[in-house]
Image: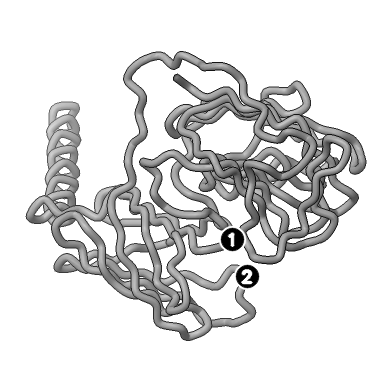
Amino acid sequence: MSIFQNASFLSMRRLMVVFLLSSTISCVSAQNESPIGRWDLMVDLGDKVVPSWLEVKLSGIKTLVGYFVAEGGSARPISKVNFVDGKISFSIPPQWEDTDKDMAFEAVLKDDKLTGTILSSKGQRQTLIGERAPLLKRTSPVTWGEPINIFNGLNLDGWHASKKKNQWVAENGIMKSPQSGANIITDQKFNDFILHIEFRYPEGSNSGVYLRGRYEIQVEDSRGQEPSSTFFGGIYGFITPNEMAAKAPGEWQTYDITLVGRRVTVVANGKKIITDQIIPGITGGALDSKEGEPGPIMLQGDHGPIEYRNIIITPAK
C-alpha cells in the first residue's frame, strides 16, 4: 500500500469512527433525553425513603457504564447500562447482602427526570425518583467567616441523635460514643466550610465524618494498610488518599477539611492526603441526596466506640 493509499485509508477510518460516535451520541441523546451524567435519587423502601445515587458514563463509542450508590455501602461499578427507547436498566451483584441474587434497576427518563423501580438482591421491589445532580461549581473566590466551635465540650447542645435512643455523651471536653448506636448530627446546616476535628478510636473501631450529611470521610483503624477510598482519610468509595496517615489506636488524630462545592481537600495529622478533588456524589449512609442544599455535620456512631473533640467549623460568608 502506498503512502497516499495509507493516508486515505486512515482518513476514511477516522471518518467512520466520528460517524459511529456521532450516531451513538445521537441515539443516546434522542429528543434531548440523555441518561449520561450524575443523578440524585430517592428510593421508597415502604417504611422510609432513603437517598441513592447513580452515574452513567459513555465508554468508547457506544457502551454505557456507570456507578451506583445504595442506602449503604460504597459506590459499585456498573459494567453495562442499557438505554433503549427512553428506558434505563442494569443489574449489579450484591455488596453487603447475604445473597447471590443481583439487584435490578429499571427507570424511565422523561422530561429530564427518572422514575422507576429497584428489585433488591433480597427480592424487595422499591420505587424511585431521580433528578440530575447539580455541578456545585463556584464562580467566585471564597471569603471565609469567623470560626465556630460547634461542640461546647460540656453537653450536646446544638446536636441531635439519628435515633430515639442516644448513646453519645459529653465528658471533659470530649464527645463520646462508648458503643455502637446512633449517629449524631448538628442542628445547624452548612454550605462551604473549613472543618477542624480531632478524634480517637480503640483498636479495630470505625466511624466517619459526614460533610453536609452526605459525603463521608472515613475514620477507621487503618494504620499499616495501603491507602484506599474505604480506609482512613478516604472519601468513602470515591477518593483514595495519596498516603496512609493514620496513627495508632488510642492516639488523638486530626482532620482539617476544606469543602467548596464538590471540591475537597483533606489534611490528616498534618499531611495533605487529598488535594482539591471532586466528590462525584453522595456516599452510603448519607442523610439525603439534596446535593444543592446546605447540610449538617454528622458523626458516625454505629460502627464501634469513638471519641471526638475540638470541632471547629469556619463557614464561607
Q: Residue 182 carries which label?
A: none
Q: Using the numbered discs, state the Cα–Cα distance from disc 2 to disc 1 in whole angstroms.
A: 7 Å
Closer-to-camera residue (62/93)? 93
Please name the residue shown 52% across and 83% down the image. Answer: 122
Return the x and y of residue 106 as percentages of the image width and height.
31, 72
Please name the residue shown 43% across and 61% down the image. Answer: 78
Circle 1: residue type:
Gly
Residue 50's place in the image compared with 232, above or below, is: below
Q: In which quarter of the image is the C terminus?
A: top left
Residue 134's place in the image compared with 44, above or below, is: above
Q: Residue 284's quadrant in the figure?
A: bottom right
Left or right placement of residue 258 versus residue 51 in this view: right
Return the x and y of residue 45 as percentages of the image width and height.
44, 75
Circle 2: residue type:
Trp
Left or right placement of residue 277 versus residue 203 in this view: left
**Proximity of marks 2 and 1: CB atoms separated by less than 8 Å:** yes
Q: For mark 2, give the secondary structure.
A: loop
**Mark 1 or mark 2, which is nearer the start of the sequence?**
1
| Residue count near mark 1 (Cα–Cα under 10 Å), binned few <14, some 14–19, many ≥20 | some
Is residue 232 in sight in this rendering? yes
* Pointer 2 residue: 96
Please name the residue shown 46% across and 14% down the image. Answer: 143
Please name the residue shown 73% across and 42% down the image. Answer: 232
Closer-to-camera residue (90/17)? 90
| Residue count near mark 2 (Cα–Cα under 10 Å), binned few <14, some 14–19, many ≥20 | few
Residue 272's place in the image compared with 132, above or below, is: above
* Pointer 1 residue: 73
Q: Quadrant of the N terminus?
A: top left
Return the x and y of residue 227 as percentages of the image width and height.
71, 40
Return the x and y of residue 107 as percentages of the image width and height.
27, 69
- Residue most toward the bottom? 123
